[in-house]
Image (cartoon, grey):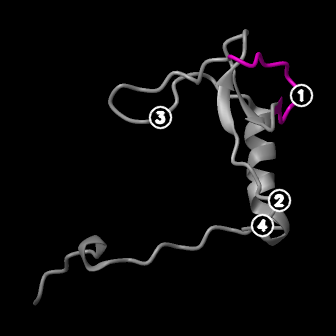
Amino acid sequence: MAAETPEFGAWHTATDGTAHYVLKGKSLCGAKIKANAPPPVRSAKSTAIVTPMCEECLDRNAARWAGEHGMKAPVPLQPQRSYWWRQLKRKKK
């Protein structure tokens, strides 16, 4: 295994009630987070995070994972392939 294995990091809740992404003991946006900060609150029905998330941490984490192979410029969305169940039903004459 490589000596410099990147850590994944985790979401933790700050004292203001916002979830921040903590990587190697520091928040990506620079917010001060306690070492024993609790994880964000999740929904009971799904694993979605209910706690409001820091927008800057979201953007920086997405850019971090995109790396050098990420999109350089926004690409327009491709039209989705139309499947047979989405086709219009036409009557035969």
What amino acid is at disc 1?
Gly
On the image, the x and y values in percent for residue 77 come to: 63, 67
Q: Earlier in the sequence, mark 2 or mark 3?
A: 2
Q: Is residue 36 above or below residue 1?
A: above
Residue occupied by mark 1: 30
Mark 2 Cα-neighbour bin, 10 Å: few <14, some 14–19, many ≥20: few
What amino acid is at disc 4?
Ala
Q: Earlier in the sequence, mark 4 or mark 1?
A: 4
What amino acid is at disc 2?
Glu
* Badge nearest the viewer, 4 or 3: 4
What residue range appears in magenta?
A: 26-36
- Residue 2 position by quadrant: bottom right
Determine the residue located farthest toward the top in the rendered image.
15
The one nearer the camera, 3 or 69, is 3
3D distance between C-alphas at marks 4 and 1: 28 Å
Q: Are marks 4 and 1 in contact (CB under 8 Å)?
A: no
Identify which residue is drawn at 77% across, 55% down: 6
Residue occupied by mark 2: 4
On the image, the x and y values in percent for residue 83 come to: 32, 77
Q: Is residue 85 above or below residue 74?
A: below
Mark 1 Cα-neighbour bin, 10 Å: few <14, some 14–19, many ≥20: few
Identify which residue is drawn at 89% across, 28% down: 30
3D distance between C-alphas at marks 2 and 3: 31 Å
On the image, the x and y values in percent for residue 81 come to: 43, 78
Q: Is residue 45 magenta?
A: no
Q: Is residue 78 above or below residue 4?
A: below
Q: Secondary structure at mark 3?
A: loop
